[in-house]
Image (cartoon, rainbow, N blue to C red):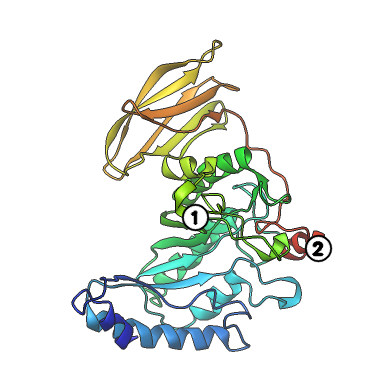
Amino acid sequence: MSAIARRYDGASGQPRVSLWQIWNEPNLKSFMATENGPADYREMVARSYPAIKAVHRGNVVVAGGLGPFGGPNGRYGIAPLRFMRALFRRKTPFDVWSHHPYTSGSPARHAYAKDDASLGDLPEIRRLLGRARSAGRIRSTRLWVTEFSWDTKPPDPFGVPVREHARWVAEALYRMWTSGVDLVVWFQLRDNPHEGFAWGQTFQSGLYYRTTALYDNEKPKPALRAFRFPFVALPRGRRVVLWGRTPDSRAARVLVQRRTRRGGWDGFLVLRADRHGIFRGSLRGHRGAMLRARVGRGNASLPFAVRRTRDRPVYPFGGDDPGALRENDR
């Protein structure tokens, strides 16, 4: 860790790297997990943290990056919440905790199995972090999502239909934000090639479709727009909650518009985005309406229907294995 941090310190002819996540999904057998997985991982983080910080005090050390599903009888590894409880029995140094909250359904869905953690379980992750800090075993409760996605249909015939997928993307960002997440990494930029593989063996979760000429003829999915300029209008009781983030994550005047019967857009509410580009509001009525947010003349979010998001089970990684979803949800 000392060697690699020095190599990418910005002064040795290589780019400056300041964000360092220690390992990937250490709770899963395919990467690390053993009977002593939490203790082994704690030692890895404890040794890496001072080495990385010694090279540059501004380096940020990220721990966790846990996979969401332990699987039935621990088939895939240790369930993430159980892994966290075991890890935090002793002091563990890091600047940010990370999780990969893949979700077998809509953005509000909880994982079915005990101690697994999908989007709906992020508040429980925050509670575990809070208790560990109160006990003096960690110093930071900052939370990132460093890997997340759903496969889309097309191309995966078992993925989430692309228009529904775009709505889920915007709402997922909102629900992560409400759980205190301030950085989200989408997995991945472009769909994998499918030739020669089963759908469940490839990731069709890109913000761009796979193309034959790669960068020469990129075709974005609707999710790209939802990720760049997320906007939601979700019913809550008798009101509608509005939330979004400007495309450049900067303060701005945001106009909320409603689709007219003639297919045009009528602005009726102005919100102010803060210095991070986050804007919020609420209103009465408008159930069933189609709303969108607009910044300036050329930047408009995808339309968002004012209704509860339909939930349905779906394997987040796509594929045609009917047992995969049942195993994750068991």
Q: Residue at x 72, y 64 (%)?
A: 328
Residue 88, image x and y in percent? Answer: 48, 78
| Residue 214 numbered tag | 1
Query: Can the viewer see residue 330?
Result: no
Given the current orientation, which residue lies at the most extreme top position?
262
Which of the 4 quarters of the picture holds residue 142?
Answer: bottom left
Density class for disc 2 (Cα within 10 Å; few <14, some 14-19, many ≥20) is: few
106 shown above or below 233: below
Q: Quadrant of the N terminus?
A: bottom left
Query: Which of 247 and 145 lies nearest the eye of the viewer?
Result: 247
Q: Residue at x 38, y 76 (%)?
A: 136
**Alpha carbon of mark 2 to alpha carbon of mark 1: how far?**
34 Å
227 shown above or below 296: below
Q: What residue does disc 2 label?
A: 323
Residue type marked 2: Gly
Query: Which of 272 and 151 lies nearest the eye of the viewer?
Result: 151
Query: Which of 108 and 194 lies nearest the eye of the viewer?
Result: 194
Residue 98, image x and y in percent? Answer: 46, 66
